[in-house]
Amino acid sequence: MADKLELDLVEISPKADPPVCRITDYQKFLYQQKRKQKELKSKAVKVIVKEIRFGPNTDDHDYQFKLKHAEKFLSEGAKVKAYVFFKGRSILFKEKGEILLLRFAQDLEEFGKVEQLPKLEGKRMIIFLSPKKVKK
C-alpha cells in the first residue's frame, strides 16, 4: 500500500502486539518534528546577565552612576553580576569590597533579590542579583 501511494511505512510502536505502523511521508514527518523543537526552543526564557565592575575604592558618584544602571538592568528583567576587582595590593581591602557589594545589594533591594552573597574568587569578589517578579 505504501509503494502504491509512494509514501514510507514507518514503525510507530515496535513492542506492541502486533507492531503498529503508519503510512506517511517520512521527510515531512522529520521536518514537522524539527519545527516543533525549534518552536519550543524559541518560547524558552533566555536569561541575560549584565556585569557591573567596581574597584575597592569606588567613589560615591561612580557608585550612584553604576547603581542607576543596575536598576535599569533589573527592571528590564536581566540578572546583574556585580564584582569588585582587586588589582595589585588592593587585595588587602577585602572588607571594603564586601561592604561595597552588600551596600549595593541593599540599595537594590526593591528591584531585585540577592541570588548569591559576596564570594571571593581569585582577584574578584562577586555578588549575583536577580530581578523580582513583576505582578501583572
Image (cartoon, grey):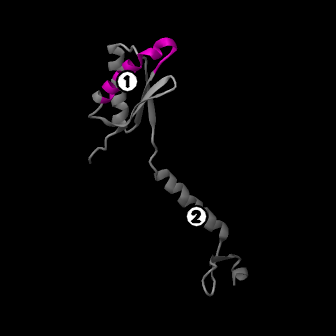
Number of marks in the rendered image? 2
Q: Magenta stretch: residue 102 in it?
A: yes
**Pointer 2 residue:** 32
What secondary structure is found at the residue carrying circle 2? helix
Q: Magenta stretch: residue 35 in it?
A: no
The vertical placement of 97 against 30, above or below, is above
**Pointer 1 residue:** 98
**Percent position of residue 28, x then y:** 63, 67
Magenta range is 85-105
Residue at 38% of width from left, 20% of height from top?
Answer: 95
**What's the residue type where badge 2 is placed?**
Gln
Dominant secondary structure of the magenta stretch? Answer: helix
Residue at 39% of width from left, 13% of height from top?
Answer: 57
Alpha-carbon neighbours of circle 2 within 10 Å: few (<14), some, or many (≥20)?
few
Alpha-carbon neighbours of circle 1 within 10 Å: few (<14), some, or many (≥20)?
many
Residue extending furthest toward the right: 3
Q: Nearer the viewer, mark 2 or mark 1?
A: 1
Q: Please tell me which of labels 2 and 1 falls first in the chain.
A: 2
Image check: 131 left or right of 29? left
**What's the residue type where badge 1 is placed?**
Glu
Residue at 45% of width from left, 38% of height from top?
Answer: 48
Report the front residue among 58 and 99: 99
Report if the CB atoms under discs 2 and 1 are less than 8 Å apart.
Answer: no
Report the front residue among 42 and 64: 64
